[in-house]
């Protein structure tokens, strides 16, 4: 009897995992693709760009970011409706072997970026928009390897809604 119960639990767990993998959010759109160049990317030691750590009971600390990298992101719109890019977000996370390694409590990943988009538009019918990015970062583990996630929010020209497109880039050591 115990064998049947454990098999039933395994089947139920497998079905629940399969259900979690099906798309349930209207925030993504399969008509927008994101390509990184180069992919993967490398980083080099950085100097001249800094961040400040605010301290409550002692003087603030200013540090140069440890690493910098540069890459391009191309958005391609295969829909029959053009879109306007309304926002973009970048997140840098420390990694090991291409896997995000979440910092321990109290440790912080510091990063900043600049972007140089050609436009805030991606035209319909295979239109593209390419943005260049410069990213500076320092990680709690002092490592160079990271995962950079880029997220765009776009609004459709026909006012049928907005959606997000997200992709990740591996910074190899």
Image: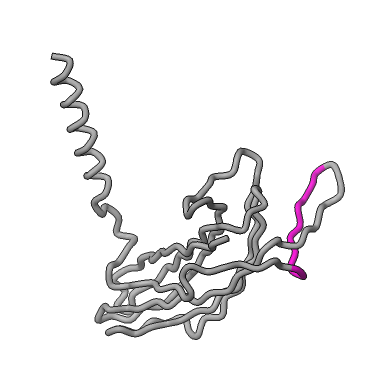
* Camera-side residue of 167 and 79: 167
Give me the residue at 35% from left, 78% from top.
Answer: 76
Q: How is the image coloured?
A: one colour
Q: Position of residue 83 (x, y in %)?
A: 36, 78
Determine whether, in the image, residue 102 is placed left or right of residue 21: right
Determine whether, in the image, residue 108 is placed left or right of residue 91: right
Question: Is residue 53 inside the magenta stretch?
Answer: yes
Q: Position of residue 18 (x, y in %)?
A: 22, 44
**112 is higher (above) or lower (below) than 95:** below
Give me the residue at 29% from left, 59% from top.
Answer: 26
Principal secondary structure, stretch drawn in magenta: loop
Q: Position of residue 49 (x, y in %)?
A: 74, 68
Question: Is residue 98 inside the magenta stretch?
Answer: no
* Camera-side residue of 7 and 54: 7
Give me the residue at 67% from left, 52% from top.
Answer: 142
Q: Position of residue 162 (x, y in %)?
A: 35, 68
Give me the residue at 26% from left, 78% from top.
Answer: 79
Q: Quadrant of the C terminus?
A: bottom right
Q: How many marks?
A: 0
Task: Please identify the quarter of the rendering in which residue 6 is found.
Answer: top left
Q: Quadrant of the N terminus?
A: top left
Task: Please identify the quarter of the rendering in which residue 48 is found.
Answer: bottom right
Q: Which residues are magenta?
A: 47-56
Task: Please identify the quarter of the rendering in which residue 91 is found.
Answer: bottom right
């Amino acid at each position: 009897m115990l064998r049947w119960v454990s098999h039933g639990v395994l089947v139920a767990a497998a079905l629940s995992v399969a259900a979690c993998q099906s798309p349930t959010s209207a925030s993504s759109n399969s008509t927008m693709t994101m390509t990184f160049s180069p992919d993967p990317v490398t980083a080099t030691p950085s100097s001249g760009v800094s961040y400040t750590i605010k301290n409550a009971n002692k003087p603030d600390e200013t540090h140069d970011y440890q690493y910098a990298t540069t890459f391009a992101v191309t958005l391609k719109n295969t829909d029959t409706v053009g879109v306007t890019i309304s926002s973009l977000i970048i997140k840098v996370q420390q990694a090991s072997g291409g896997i995000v390694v979440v910092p321990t409590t109290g440790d912080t990943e510091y990063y900043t970026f600049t972007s140089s988009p050609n436009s805030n538009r991606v035209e319909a019918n295979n239109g593209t928009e390419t943005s260049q990015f410069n990213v500076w970062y320092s990680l709690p583990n002092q490592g160079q390897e990271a995962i950079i996630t880029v997220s765009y929010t776009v609004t459709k020209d026909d006012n049928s809604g907005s959606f997000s497109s997200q992709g990740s880039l591996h910074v190899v050591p």
